[in-house]
Amino acid sequence: MDVKKLALLVGALVIAVITAVMAKNMFTGAGAQQAAAAPAVPVGPKVLVAKKALPVGTIIDAEALGWQPWPKELTQSAYYTEGQPDADTQKLLGTVVRYQVTAGQPLTRGSLVGPKDRGFLAAALGPGMRAITVPVNASTGVAGFVFPGDHVDLVLTQTVQGGGDGPALKVSETIVRNIRVLATDQRIDSKGEDGKTEVKTFSNVTLEVTPRIAEKVAVSQSIGTLSLSLRSIADNTAELERAVATGQVKVPAGANPADERQMLLAVANRPMDSNTTYSTGGDVSRFQRRTVPARPEAQMASAMGALGKGLAAGLTGQGGAGGAAYAGPGVRVARGNNITVVPVGAR
């Protein structure tokens, strides 16, 4: 056989093999992409599931729940199914988790308790915490823009009267920080005639506090006026960093990230009554005081005069238990620390 023909035959075989391999890889890749683009979708209704881990006492917000298709054969009657009258997520906002729910787990009707249900506050309270109610109005309650689950600071405003007749001292003090709101007597989820949300104020707010802070809040209501100061959601991150930096949280060795996160949140969500701040009227207006008003000069002079007469009478033996002090005209003679009153014109 000719050498040239043999070389052409070998080259043709090599090209054929390469073409076959490329065609196989191309068809295999296309089949894999087609299979990945069409995942199996569960055939069944949509049920309400937890979008994140919900520990006991968590107040449900808009980011906690979501709808997810669920296999029909695995759907139970206790699940919240889309389309049912009691499965409205807006009506579930503000409810409290009674039993722990993991992320992706369907919620059952027994796992949530509403504000009007029995045991609502007991389920919302954390271990060792107490619930206390504070009366507010439109100005002291952030105009109604406070929801269950929000965190607020308590500000006490009072008037401190001094010993004199001058103007009193106006002072405002942040007595407690980072308090979680458990409930309000009115909500903001009602709809008006035009379909828009109506903002309604409330007259009472129930807060989660420690036993000691509950005593401070009860006393502060008799001292002055309490106001709510709404905290930003971003402050939770700062509190987590502070808890780690100060060593308040000691994570056990080998703890998973989920448990570590829960421990940090438990510390960051606790109220704090230390390192409080205050402002006086002088910090706001130049016409206000910075300290408690002093006694007037006239009262001070009268008091000093009375004190001097009493001291002189005691030193000369003319007053006190030994006898009445001389009240007629006289001359005071001082010899060192001894003061003597010499009567003038007395008979």
Image (cartoon, grey):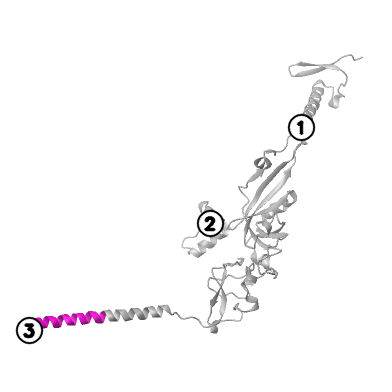
Residue at disc 3, secondary structure: loop
For marks 3 and 1, give the one nearer the viewer.
3
Q: Looking at numbered disc 2 in the image, what kind of residue is underneath it?
A: Thr
Instruction: Estimate how packed mark 2 is, as few (under 14), some (14 to 19) or many (20 or more) residues with alpha carbons within 10 Å.
Output: few
Quadrant of image for the C terminus:
top right
Q: Position of residue 221 (x, y in %)?
A: 73, 52
Tell how many labels: 3
Question: Which residue lies at the image location 36% right of the left edge and 81% below the top edge?
Answer: 31
Task: Please tell me whether residue 189 belongs to the stretch shown in magenta.
Answer: no
Residue 121, above or below 157: below
Q: Which residue is mark 1?
A: 296
Q: Which residue is mark 2?
A: 237
As drawn, is 216 to the left or to the right of 55?
right
Q: Position of residue 316 (x, y in %)?
A: 81, 20
Q: Looking at numbered disc 1 in the image, what kind of residue is underneath it?
A: Pro
Instruction: Estimate how packed mark 3 is, as few (under 14), some (14 to 19) or many (20 or more) residues with alpha carbons within 10 Å.
Output: few
Question: Which residue lies at the image location 38% right of the left edge and 78% below the top edge?
Answer: 33
As drawn, is 73 to the left or to the right of 299?
left
Residue at disc 2, secondary structure: helix
Cα separation, mark 3 vs mark 1, equals 131 Å
Q: Which residue is mark 3?
A: 2
Q: Quadrant of residue 320?
A: top right
Quadrant of image for the N terminus:
bottom left
Is tag 3's residue or tag 1's residue first in the polypeptide sequence? 3
